[in-house]
Image (cartoon, rainbow, N blue to C red):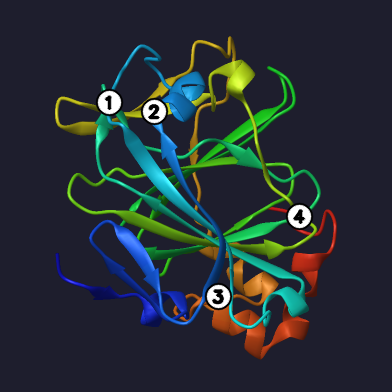
């Protein structure tokens, strides 16, 4: 397979080749493979046996502790194109209760689902299309999943947040998010998770509306922006700082 240089879109010396990321001079704290057994509690059909691998996580990416010393943590998720039954491959739902995060689409395309579910009467679901260069600010308190809706291309997302943020896996008890994204009759559809008796209809959300408000430029890798103008991103290191 051809080697694809991701430096322009990620701001980091990383090459993509043979279904893996190859950092050039970077350190990675941990690399993990997320398999179907890990995903099973959040799948529409939990009895499936394939695909075996959904995605890879590369966490704690750094270079000579440059990001660590700035209180920044960088992770990358590589989601493979496939179907789990009729459901597109996706990530496990994660949430950070008090700190915001930023997702930067480095390669491919797909969908980001965000939800804030306090009760059947008080909940919100946002559906955000992703393509290369698309950046999304994830507010504190929102659960999120990344879905690869392309059939022949990986989805590669860079995540950046404060070291204090510590996102965690959530929603196993609800079988995942309140909606699943499926392929039906060669089209993309959204269906409600029966684990939620009531859930708001997903709203198509334009993430670009608040990027300028928080000092984010659309076409420059978020890593470069934060390192060049660190003071503009004080909100990334503050609790309860983002509102949409």
The residue that disc 3 covers is 222
Q: Which mark is residue 165?
A: 4
Q: Secondary structure at mark 4?
A: loop
Quarter of the figure that contains the N terminus: bottom left
Residue 6, compared with residue 139, is above or below; it is below
- Marks 3 and 2: which is nearer the front? 2
- Measured as percent of width and height from the top left, residue 4 is found at 25, 73
Residue 187, compared with residue 199, is above or below; it is below
- Measured as percent of width and height from the top left, residue 111 is found at 40, 46
- Marks 4 and 1: which is nearer the front? 1
How far is mark 3 from mark 4, CA to CA? 17 Å
- Marks 1 and 3: which is nearer the front? 1
How far is mark 2 from mark 1, CA to CA? 7 Å
Q: Secondary structure at mark 2?
A: helix
Residue 138, compared with residue 62, is above or below; it is above
The residue that disc 2 covers is 36
Of residues 203 and 160, the one drawn nearer to the viewer in this rendering: 160
- Measured as percent of width and height from the top left, residue 68 is found at 72, 74
Marks 2 and 4 close (CB-CB < 8 Å): no
Q: Secondary structure at mark 1?
A: loop
Q: Is residue 132 visible?
A: no
Marks 2 and 1 close (CB-CB < 8 Å): yes
Q: Secondary structure at mark 3?
A: helix
How far is mark 1 from mark 3, CA to CA? 34 Å
The residue that disc 1 covers is 50
Residue 192, compared with residue 56, is above or below; it is above
Q: Earlier in the sequence, mark 3 or mark 2?
A: 2
Query: Which quadrant of the figure has residue 17?
Result: bottom left
- Side of 203 where 211 appears, left or right: right
């Amino acid at each position: 397979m051809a080697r694809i240089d991701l430096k322009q879109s990620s701001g980091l010396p990383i090459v993509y080749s043979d279904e893996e990321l190859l950092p050039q001079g970077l350190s990675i704290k941990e690399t993990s493979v997320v398999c179907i057994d890990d995903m099973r509690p959040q799948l529409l059909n939990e009895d499936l046996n394939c695909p075996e691998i959904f995605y890879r996580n590369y966490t704690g990416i750094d270079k000579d502790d440059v990001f660590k010393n700035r209180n920044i943590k960088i992770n990358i998720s590589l989601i493979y194109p496939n179907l789990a039954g009729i459901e597109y491959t996706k990530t496990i739902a994660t949430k950070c209760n008090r700190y915001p995060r930023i997702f930067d689409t480095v390669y491919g395309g797909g969908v980001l689902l965000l939800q804030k579910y306090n009760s059947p009467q008080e909940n919100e679901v946002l559906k955000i299309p992703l393509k290369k260069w698309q950046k999304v600010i994830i507010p504190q308190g929102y659960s999120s999943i990344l879905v690869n809706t392309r059939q022949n291309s990986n989805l590669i997302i860079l995540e950046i947040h404060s070291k204090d943020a510590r996102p965690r896996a959530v929603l196993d008890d609800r079988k995942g998010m309140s909606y699943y994204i499926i392929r039906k009759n060669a089209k993309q559809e959204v269906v409600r998770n029966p684990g939620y008796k009531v859930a708001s209809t997903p709203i198509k959300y334009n993430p670009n509306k608040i990027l300028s408000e928080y000092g984010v430029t659309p076409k420059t890798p978020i890593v470069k922006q934060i390192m060049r103008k660190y003071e503009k991103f004080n909100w990334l290191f503050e609790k309860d700082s983002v509102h949409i």
